[in-house]
Image (spheres, rainbow, N blue to C red):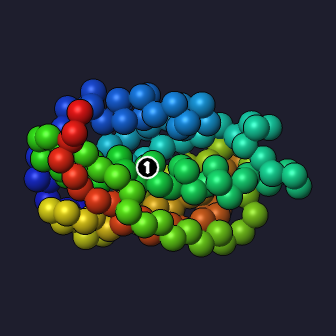
Amino acid sequence: MVEKLYELPREELERIFSAAPFVANLGIQLTSLGPGECETRLEIGPSHLQQDGFVHAGVQATMADHTAGGAAATLIGPGEVVLTAELKINLLRAARGRTLRCLSKVLKPGSRLTVVESEVFCESEEDRKLVSKTTVTIAVVKNGR
C-alpha cells in the first residue's frame, strides 16, 4: 500500500465517476476506494459487446483507465486533477460473463506522473477470470476549473 499524500473527500472521488458522461453511460460503478486503490463494477449488457458476443476491448480499456484515474486521485493534493498520459492494455482472453470488476493499484506515485496497474476480471455464476491487464501513466496537473 502506498502512503496517502492528501485525502480527497469521498464526494470528489464519486464525482469523478458520476460526472463523466461516457463512464456513467457505460454503467461503470465505483465500489471501493483506499489510498492508492480503486475498484469498480459493471453489469454486462448487450451494448457492451462486440460483434461475436464478447465484451468489447474499448469497454475494458475505458474501465481500466477510469478506475486507474480513481486510484491515482486518492493520492493527489488540493487543487490537482488527474489525466491519462499513456495507456497500455493486454487483452488476455475473451470476456464473456455477467459482470466485469476492475481493481486498480498505484505502483509508483509521483508529484507529476503516477503509474497505475489495472486488472479487469470477468465474472459469471461459475467462475472469475482475469481478462485484461492495463498499465496507465497518469499526469497530475493543476486544476484549471
Q: Position of residue 38 (x, y in %)?
A: 37, 48
Q: In the picture provided, is 83 more to the left or to the right than 51?
A: left
Q: Position of residue 17 (x, y in %)?
A: 42, 34
Going by the picture, which residue comes out furthest to the front? 144
Q: In the picture provided, is 112 more to the left or to the right than 64?
A: left
Q: Quadrant of residue 93?
A: bottom right
Q: Position of residue 134 (x, y in %)?
A: 50, 67
Q: Quadrant of residue 80?
A: top left
Label 1, secondary structure: give it. helix
Can residue 87 be seen here? The reply is yes
Residue depicted at x 34% and y 52%: 83
Q: Quadrant of residue 14?
A: top left
Residue depicted at x 35% and y 29%: 15
- Determine crowd level at label 1: few under 14, some 14-19, many 20+ residues with C-alpha closer than 10 A: many
Residue depicted at x 25% and y 70%: 108
Can residue 106 be seen here? The reply is no
Q: How many marks?
A: 1
The answer to whether residue 145 is above or below residue 55 is above
Q: Which residue is mark 1?
A: 67
The quarter of the image holding the C terminus is top left
Identity, as a three-letter code, of the amino acid under mark 1: Thr
The quarter of the image holding the N terminus is bottom left
Q: In the picture provided, is 30 more to the left or to the right than 110?
A: right
Residue depicted at x 57% and y 57%: 61
Q: Position of residue 121 (x, y in %)?
A: 59, 57
79, 51: nearer the viewer: 79
The answer to whether residue 130 is above or below residue 16 is below
The answer to whether residue 118 is above or below residue 17 is below
